[in-house]
Image (cartoon, grey):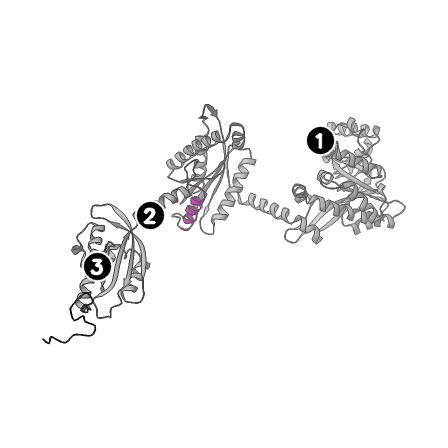
Amino acid sequence: MNGPPKGPGQDPEGGLGATPTSFTESDVLRDYRAAFRIAQLPMALVGRSGQILAANPALGLLLGVEPAALAGQRADAVTGLGLDGRTRGSYHAVLRGHSDRMRCTRRLKHADGHTLWAEVTVLPTGDDAAAATAALLTVQDISERRDLQQRLRHIQMHDPVTRLPNRALFFERLTTALADSATGRIGLCYLGLDGFKAINDTLGHRVGDQLLGAAAQRLAHCATGAGGHLVARLGGDEFAVLVEGSSGTEQLTGLAEAMLTALRPPFDLDGQRLAVSASIGVVERESAGTSATNLMQAADTTLYWAKTDGKARWTLFDPERNANRMTRQSLSSTLRPAVDRGEFTLEYQPIVGLADDIVRGAEALVRWNHPRFGKLGPDKFVGLAEENGAIVPLGRWVLREACRQARRWQLDHPAAPLFVSVNVAVRQVWDSDLVRDVAEALEESGLPSGLLQLELTESAVMGSAGRPLQALQALSDMGVRIAIDDFGTGYSNLAYLSRLPVRALKLDGLFVRGFRTARHLNPADETIVTSLVQLAHKLGLTVTAECVEGPAQAERLRRIGCDTGQGWHYARPMPPAALSQLLTTPSLRGGPADT
């Protein structure tokens, strides 16, 4: 019996090998709807006008409403996509087909009142412009993930010892505060505990950590009571209090005073009663033009001032004081290169015989021709050079240049050659081979050793032992004159001088100023100077008086028996050419030089 014709590949018996009938468009649409309905991912179809066309049960469950109740509502209102302009613009770009995706994180509200964090994604459906559906919206609950992130962030951003915000969180808040200050001003108290290292070293780190925790509680209580300011531990024993929207310096200094008061009562820790003080640097300024780095630099500097000013106090940032510090820093960092660049010169001040007013020698005084600050005297940079070690190459250059110039004077005036006096810092003795440096300078210049005098301060020479004493003895054995500068301001142990290779004393100007004129004569000063000169002469030492500023002083010093004088009464420090011209004058008697 003939049946209906069989299609290609169709099993005539209708068995398992039969080809299924093709799905119709309605079948596919029905399956899509089924998948949309049973999907665990909350979803909604959004029309071109932005209204929800359909929501699946998962979305209704997430929000605590019936899915049908969501239909007709605006999707941006349900998911918070319209809360800010940037997100709203990205959302509408997807609806219009101008963008292929947008994603954001939003805080949504459940029907029972609790909130949840969700990641909202909007994708275009790709239908033609005539279709009703424009986009597929999905909402994924990320509350647990976000909660975990928040816990991890809290651990990352808080100090485990004090449980205060740490440096990272502090700088994050500081940067935000600078950008969004309500008053246009910002304040910072930077606090360091005084002597904390000694507590750690003697009582151990466990007690030290307990002290940090207890101090942190008191500081946090102060900051909370003063307006809820952020308190952070920046490391070690250092804390910072950030005052956002500062009302002025009085607010900051009042807070600093309150914190000092709070830390004043002793701490009872692990059977120990500990007293601790703090030093606080206070900075208050306009937010505009201030960066977090600059603010912290100012705070760190001011904390240093508070400690050097005596500790247990607060110190307010001073722009002028900071400018001086910055200048010192700039000078210190450029000292060594300046020696190599030849920025230093020498001036010379005559040392005059008081009996005949004839120039006997000259003290070499270094000057720095700074490209930015102009001509600087030794008081501006020699102390810095001693601190950072630049005094060694600088002193070596001064020594060689002074010997070279003295040799030239010797050749020009062989009948009465001048000795040159060069100041030597103690660090030159310890950090370099001074004996070798002197020998090389004398050899290079050809200057006889007897025409070189080295001046060391009284505190550096008195009590010298070991290497310094050996160096002084070796130099003396070479024929170099050793002089003590500023004598009378330090130890003044004349008996000890007999055991040192010293040949000259330079009396400090403090003694000489005491009998400047007859009207202001100080008998005590004249008695002291007379005694010093007489004792020095008995020890075989010559005496030079510094800071001779007038004829009355010169006359008294001459009468006392002082050997030589130096000061503005005779001449100010001058370039070597000017001193060469001065040497043609037989005597400087008659008043101060105009040089």
Q: Which residue is outermost to the top?
A: 271
Q: On the image, which quarter does residue 546 sit in? A: top right
Circle number at residue 146: 2
Give the mark nearest the N terminus, 3 or 1: 3
In the rendered image of this protein, does residue 185 appear above or below residue 74? above
Instruction: Name the residue type under label 1.
Output: Gly
**Label 3 – label 1 distance at C-alpha:** 98 Å
Is the C-beta separation of discs 3 and 2 under 8 Å? Answer: no
Q: Nearer the viewer, mark 3 or mark 1?
A: 3
Q: Estimate how packed mark 1 is, as few (under 14), some (14 to 19) or many (20 or more) residues with alpha carbons within 10 Å.
A: few
Residue matched to label 3 = 35
In the rendered image of this protein, does residue 205 appear above or below residue 357? above
Element at badge 3?
helix
574 or 461: which is nearer to us?
A: 461
Residue matched to label 1 = 490
Residue at position x 78%, y 26% in the image: 495
**Label 1 – label 2 distance at C-alpha:** 70 Å
The chief SS type of the magenta part is helix
Residue at position x 80%, y 46% in the image: 441
Please provide percent x and percent y for residue 375: 68, 50
Give the mark nearest the N terminus, 1 or 2: 2
- The boundaries of the magenta stretch are 163-179
**Label 3 – label 2 distance at C-alpha:** 28 Å
Quadrant assignment for the N terminus? bottom left
340 or 549: which is nearer to us?
A: 340
